[in-house]
Image (spheres, rainbow, N blue to C red):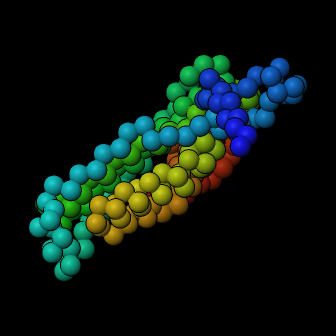
Amino acid sequence: MAKKEKPEVPSERFTPPTPEETGETEMPPLVINGQYIKDLSFEAPKTPGILSILQQTPPEISVNIDVQANSQGENFYEVNLSVNADAKIGEDIVYLCEVQYCGLFTLNVQQEYLEPALLIDCPTILFPYLRRVVSDLTGDAGFAPLLLNPLDFASLYQQRHPQANAQENIDYKSDEI
């Protein structure tokens, strides 16, 4: 029986190839180099007692989502999408869920488009994966899966950066998420 050769795993798994290595003269504007869970925490301090209370009273759930981007080198960025969710019945904590889901991206865009790409495009790519992690985590813990509503990162960016609205003459009104 012939022995199968294992495919070679690159030593720098999360480092994008250079144009010289790929034979291309120009890199695409956005390259996903990797994604991963950076931090994960789940606490259900009142179980199993709280489970019987959940049969009669639904919890109040609070969710906060944040996006941060950090340079890791020339045109190479880590985008961190974090969610903090807590479920409570009155003052009793049902659960606390904290997840930081990150992606490594190579961005070959003009400087004026860098911040929107980091805070709109990259989180839009990462969000479905973060949503799945949170849903699986809460469901596997014995609670109803927490399904995060889709987010419009472009609207959130415009809310936080009103100068972009003024520069582009965009009149934007939004409801709270």
Specify the quadrant that holds the C terminus: bottom left
Along the viewing direction, whichever of 110 and 124 lies nearer the viewer? 124
x and y, in percent, of residue 44 in the image: 21, 56
Q: Nearer the viewer, residue 15 or 11?
A: 11
* Number of numbered labels in the structure image: 0
Q: Is residue 134 visible?
A: yes
- Residue 155 location, x and y as percent? 57, 52
Give the answer, above or below, for where 153 lies relative to 117.
Answer: below
Q: Is residue 104 left or right of residue 139?
A: right
Q: Is residue 42 left or right of residue 16?
A: left
In this rendering, position of residue 50 left or right of residue 75: left
Q: Quadrant of the N terminus?
A: top right
Give the percent coordinates (x, y) of residue 144.
33, 69
Residue at 21% across / 79% down in the picture?
55
Residue extending furthest toward the front: 1
Q: Residue at x 18, y 70 (%)?
A: 51
Q: Nearer the viewer, residue 141 or 98?
A: 141
Q: Residue at x 74, y 31 (%)?
A: 109
- Say whether residue 38 is left or right of residue 26: left
Seen in the picture, residue 138 relative to 130 is either above or below; the reply is below
- Along the line of sight, which residue is nearer the eye, 25 or 153? 25
| Quadrant of the image occupied by residue 57 | bottom left
Which residue: 34% across, 62% down? Answer: 140
Q: Position of residue 161 (x, y in %)?
A: 55, 40
Q: Is residue 150 above or below residue 42?
A: below
**Residue 59 picture quarter:** bottom left
Q: Is residue 25 above or below residue 146?
A: above
